[in-house]
Amino acid sequence: MSAVAGTDPEAAYYQAVEEYFVSRRGDPLFLSNADWNLVRRWRLAGIPLRVVLRGIRDALDAHAHGWSRERKVGSLAYCAREVDSARERWERALALDGAEGTEPASALSAFAEQLASASGPGPRTRAVAQAIAVELRAPPATGLEALTRWLGEREARLLEAIAADEPPERRAEREREVDASLEPWRGRMPARIVEQIRSEALARRTLEAHGLPRLSLFHLEGGGELPS
């Protein structure tokens, strides 16, 4: 399954990891359930796609030059240590210390501006958006993973407010669209991963429909091109 324009970015993350690992491994076998669950762990931890692919590249490059190079890499788990190392390098590069001018601080400031100026949401959502904008201007001093969870909690508050403001039929229509987009993945991935992708895709589409940002730091990928 090749990546195509229009693929939901939530599914595209999993798809890109699978395609890159399979192509670099040089074996037509697809990911196992255990592999898919490892990708899910990376996704939920907020590790950007570029960082994951760098880790996979580093692991397979090392294998290609090692004593065991004649032996096929059997699982994505072989790359887990290098993905963790790539993540640590990425976090150091971001210099996450809460100071003005760091990439996360700039992103939080941009989110706050978008929430404060949003005019599309209903009354309850506008009030929640304004309150979260204030919180984003004074975030907790914490690590990147904890900050990702903190943002997720505030995004959940936004989504609850939207659900209270908008007609149920609008959400039902959105759910049908997402379900149709995920149909090719059902049966290929564990059900809980498909549901995770579905939940994230619904969140993104819901927020976009009301002119609101996803409260995610996924775009802070440290620059550079995707590994070849």
Image (tube, rainbow, N blue to C red):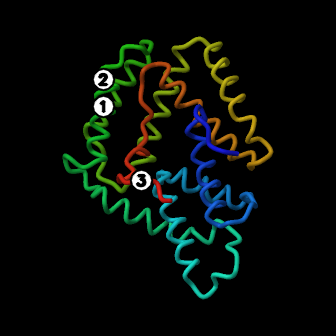
Amino acid at the residue labelled 1: Ala
- Give the crowd class for mark 2: few <14, some 14-19, many >=20 residues within 10 Å: some
In this view, the mark in front (1 or 3): 3
Q: In this view, does 80 lie above or below 36?
A: below
From the top left corner, tell me how far across and down residue 168 is, in percent.
63, 14
Q: How many marks?
A: 3
Residue linked to disc 1: 112
Distance (Cα) linking label 1 and label 3 = 29 Å
In this view, the mark in front (3 or 2): 3
Dot 1: element = helix
From the top left corner, tell me how far across and down residue 58 is, in percent.
50, 70
The first of marks 1 and 3 along the sequence is 1
- Give the crowd class for mark 1: few <14, some 14-19, many >=20 residues within 10 Å: many
Residue linked to disc 3: 225
Residue linked to disc 2: 116
Distance (Cα) linking label 2 and label 1 = 6 Å
Query: Do the residues under discs 2 and 1 have CB atoms within 8 angstroms?
Result: yes
Amino acid at the residue labelled 3: Glu
The first of marks 3 and 2 along the sequence is 2
Amino acid at the residue labelled 2: Ala
Furthest residue toward left: 100
Q: Residue at x 67, y 19 (%)?
A: 172
